[in-house]
Amino acid sequence: MKEKETIYTERAPEAIGPYNQAVVVEDTIYISGQIGLKPESMEFAGSDIESQAKQVMENLKAILEEAGSSFGQVIKISIYLDDMDNFSSVNKIYGSYFSDDSLPSRETVAVKTLPKNALVEISCIAYR
């Protein structure tokens, strides 16, 4: 049976439910959906899509680094938006964290609501 390793860093928000920031099985990292909460205060980085999207990416970056990985090793991203009108703003910020030769697969969907009424949530799968 494969062992599951739990990943935790103080540089990303605490889990707000019964889940971990990330788990690793073999060399695959499964990162739970991140919203735009600042880890030190557990408050949103701002009320606009840009500040929340940037904080989400910084939260993912912190967890990836804690797991021994980086955005260059991300395989799959799932983006959830509260409003598809925010797609281009999130896409621009999201894209700034990747180089053209390291782009992962991705889907983006609009949902009715997100945890804590966040504007964006992003999860990912990576390797190390």
Image (spheres, rainbow, N blue to C red):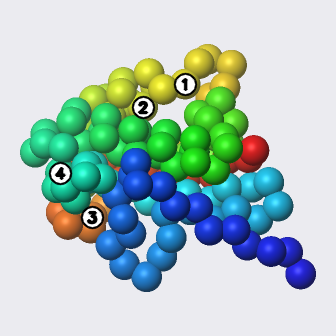
Mark 4 and mark 3 residues within 8 Å of each other at the beta carbon: no
Residue drawn at x 63%, y 50% is 67
Q: Amino acid at mark 4?
A: Phe
The quarter of the displayed image where residue 105 is located: top right
Q: Which residue is mark 1?
A: 98
Kindly identify which residue carries mark 3.
114
Q: Residue at 44% across / 21% down in the picture?
A: 96
Residue 73 image point, x, y percent:
69, 36
Name the spot of residue 100 as percent of width and height, x first: 61, 17
Identify the mark nearer the N-term, 4 or 3: 4
Disc 4 marks which residue? Answer: 44
CA separation, marks 3 and 1? 25 Å
**Label 2 or label 4, whichever comes before in sequence order:** 4
- Left or right of 103 in this view: 128: right
Relative depth, front residue between 76 and 30: 30
Q: Amino acid at mark 2?
A: Tyr
**Label 4, label 1: how many angstroms apart (C-alpha)?**
24 Å
Residue at (65, 30) in percent of width and height = 72
Find out whether the residues at labels 2 and 3 contact each other: C-beta distance under 8 Å.
no
Between the C-alphas of marks 2 and 3, the distance is 18 Å
The disc at residue 94 is 2
Secondary structure at badge 4 equals loop
* x and y, in percent, of residue 29 in the image: 67, 55
Image depth: mark 4 or mark 3 in front: 4
Give the mark nearer the N terminus: 4 vs 1. Answer: 4
Quarter of the image for the C terminus: give it. top right
